[in-house]
Image (spheres, rainbow, N blue to C red):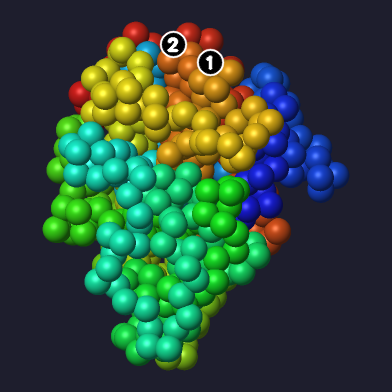
Amino acid sequence: MTRPVLRRAAWAARAAGASALGVVVLAACGAASASPMAPPPAVTPAMPLSGLAIPGMTSVDQVISLLMTRWDIPGGAVGIVKDGRLVYARGFGYADAEAKRVAAPDALFRIASLSKPITAAAVLRLVEQNRLSLDAKAFALLSDLKPLVGATVDPRLADITVRHLLQHAGGWDRDASFDPMFRSTEIAAATNTPVPASAEAVIRFMHGQRLDFDPGRRYAYSNFGYAVLGRIIERVTVGPYDKFVQDAVLTPAGIHRMRLGRSLYADRAPDEVRYYDRASLSSVFAAGGAVSAPYGGFNLEAMDAHGGWVASTVDLLRFATAVDRLPTRPDILAGATVDMMTAKPPSPLWDGSAFYYGMGWLVRPAEQNWWHDGSLPGTASIMVRTGTGLAWVALFNARSIKPNSTFQGEIDSAMWQAVKGVTEWPTYDLFSTFP
């Protein structure tokens, strides 16, 4: 859900050997930017921190505190894994700024598009169980979701496969047309269903929209494609999307606190942070009336499979180390499945590129780095797995409350800078200290 122009800039930077969206964006804006190789600053701004302070890892405290101070980010959490061991887990700032509630190391945050690797893993579990084929026709599996009366169905819709959806090659380009996951009120009216529009209503509406390109011919990031995958999981398992994810992905990885988020503040989960955004939007839950964008400006429930999960950094690192193909912790997917998940899509996708989007992860194969980021009003997130035994997750409860923010673009460079400044890696494992 990150703005696509920034996302493409980040990937181009990675392909060129840079590690940060922030480097590209700041250069384009004419602003100075510290190199990811630069040493950490000597002074940490005054900001409440929670969790274990680690002498050899003060660079992380300093870099993240400065980043959040610069962009007025109320709260965040960062976790880092080294060789399968959780060696760093700290909360920064406030989970609730008004109540002065300090962010805990394992506070729950909306994770936005970090939900996509979770959904991809669930689909691949079904493939391993011989219950689903990657080459199955996606909309044949959703035959109960009929087009609207009078809709003209693009015949190419029948060609879209599960593989296409996982690789963002289904044929929808939100830059060329629109992202239907953020057209909730309009789609509810068109489908004559209650507001806000459900994922099923969005799919029925999209039956009548022409594809932007032939399936499999190119890449275009699609939230809608992953929403379709969520409904396919439900049809194959004959049960709720989140139940299969819990049973087949999260529980085997030792994760028990992750859950699907709710749109409204009153429905937030225990230990979930409060979200902040400058924008006020018309509520998708009722006609008229402006609301704070994170609480009713979009329908998070319909975004479950592409952007709806709530999690802690610790649990996301449990997931990352359970699909990382490294011997340090047991994987929940077979090695061959992980290889397929991170393999380069078939031509012509990503031809000539040093990086690509596999199935739920961006991959830079030369370094065996995988990553995904996420963004919604009130949410900024990133998850990275490196080929050197490191992995990290950073979650924040604002994209930035400053106008014209490039904060989302600077998170990646800040994390690379922070880990490069570590002087000594701990030998303990903090996973056992978090239930």
- Rendering coords of residue 255 (x, y %): 21, 37
Please give the name of the residue rendered at 40% of the width and 51% of the height, measured from the top-left corner: 161
The front one of 172 and 56 is 172
Instruction: Determine crowd level at label 1: few under 14, some 14-19, many 20+ residues with C-alpha closer than 10 A.
Output: some
- Rendering coords of residue 64 (x, y %): 55, 35
Q: Is residue 151 above or below residue 14?
A: below
Q: Is residue 243 above or below residue 256?
A: below
Q: CA distance from mark 2 to mark 1?
A: 7 Å
Instruction: Determine crowd level at label 2: few under 14, some 14-19, many 20+ residues with C-alpha closer than 10 A.
Output: some
Which mark is on residue 261?
none
Please give the name of the residue rendered at 81% of the width and 45% of the height, measured from the top-left corner: 28
The front one of 166 and 251 is 166
Write down the residue under mark 2: 425
Residue type beneath disc 2? Trp
Image-based side of 210 in relation to 339, left or right: right
Image-based side of 410 in relation to 94, left or right: right
Please give the name of the residue rendered at 17% of the width and 33% of the height, measured from the top-left corner: 252
Residue type beneath disc 1? Val
- Rendering coords of residue 281 (x, y %): 52, 77
Whether residues under marks 2 and 1 lie with C-beta atoms below 8 angstroms apart, the answer is yes
Residue 106 in view, yes or no: no
Which mark is on residue 422?
1
- Rendering coords of residue 212 (x, y %): 60, 64
Please give the name of the residue rendered at 68% of the width and 52% of the height, measured from the top-left corner: 5
Residue 130: quarter of image: top left
Quadrant where the image shows the C terminus: top left
Q: Is residue 423 above or below residue 97?
A: above
The front one of 418 and 371 is 371
Provide the secondary structure element on which disc 2 rests: loop
Provide the secondary structure element on which disc 1 rests: loop
